[in-house]
Amino acid sequence: MKRRLRAIIIALLVCWSGSCYADFQEAERAFDKGDYPSALALYRADETPESFNKLGVLYYNGLGVGRNMSEALHWFRRAADLGSAEAQANLGQLYETGDGVTRDLAEAMKWYGKAAAGGDPDAQHDFDRLRAESEPRRIRWYRKDAQLGHVTAQYNLADAYYHGEEVPQDKREAAKWYLKAAEQGNVPAQYMLGLMLLQGDGVQNAPAEGVAWLRKAASSGHREAQYQMGRCLLQGIGVRRDSEEAVLWLRKAAAQGEPTAVAELKEVGK
């Protein structure tokens, strides 16, 4: 924890909800002087994520107070839940090492990931390291080739993340790789990305963008995309209603044996 549980130095006053961090700065000065009991009291008086994290540091190391892992975890979690990347990284390391908690690499990756998203480069490194260590060989191969631009690997990696096969399910990560594959013309990726955007499945709902990708896949002969195009045109989802074009797409899908398209055509009397 020596690297992670370091002092946070703030040079200027930072304001929070109209009140400045005077207590925090005073606490930092006490901390730097080694006056840990005073720092402890001042951090407690300052209701900010930074102070909550520093309380965790004090309790973890037993500075100015008896070492207490339960209290340390309490304050780290309070700070982490309020968005402190430092506290999130601290929790990640505790869960990785099993220090005061049951060792849980998935939980460690979760907190490292949050800290990395908050701008902590060390946490990003730790997240990437744990992911590489924990991923099956097949997924590592997919990732390596996907990063080199191989479209099939990009699709396979996206599919693994979408379905949670050999990796924790992560639909945002899936969408990222489906997009890369779709932009290179991979038809199944175009369909999956279109469907995700259409339904807001793990990504922000964007029906018009979803229909655009579905149209690309449908135009390349993807029967499920053809059915979805027909459905969207019938209902006006992400596109203006057009029953004539809808029937055309449904007939294309039905001709390829898509059972849902056959049922839809019967419903509209075609």
Image: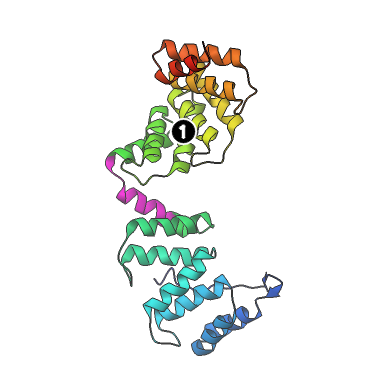
Q: In which quarter of the image is residue 47?
A: bottom right
Q: In this view, does 87 lie above or below 155?
A: below
Q: How is the image coloured?
A: rainbow
Instruction: Give the main secondary structure, helix, strand or loop, of the magenta stretch.
Output: helix
Looking at the rendered structure, the kind of residue marked 1 is: Tyr
* In this picture, residue 109 sits left or right of residue 34: left
Q: Residue at x 51, y 27 (%)?
A: 183
Percent position of residue 19, x then y:
69, 75
* Residue closest to the eye, 117 or 206: 206
Q: Which residue is drawn at 46% across and 76% down?
A: 56
Q: Name the residue under label 1.
A: 178
Reply yes or no: does residue 131 show up in magenta: yes
Percent position of residue 233, x then y:
58, 21
Q: In this view, does 81 lie above or below 201?
A: below
Quadrant, the N terminus: bottom left
Reply yes or no: does residue 39 show up in magenta: no
Residue at the far right in the pictured view: 18
Q: Is residue 7 above or below residue 35?
A: above
Percent position of residue 159, x then y:
38, 34
Q: Which residue is drawn at 59% across and 35% down?
A: 206
Q: Which residue is drawn at 59% across and 25% down?
A: 235
> Can the viewer see residue 47 in this picture?
yes
* SS assignment at label 1: helix
Mark 1 surroundings: few (<14), some (14-19) or many (≥20) residues within 10 A = many
* Residue closest to the eye, 34 or 106: 106
Percent position of residue 77, x then y:
46, 68
Q: Quadrant of residue 66?
A: bottom left
Q: Which residues fall within the magenta stretch?
A: 125-137
* In this picture, residue 23 sits left or right of residue 133: right
* In this picture, residue 137 sits left or right of residue 177: left
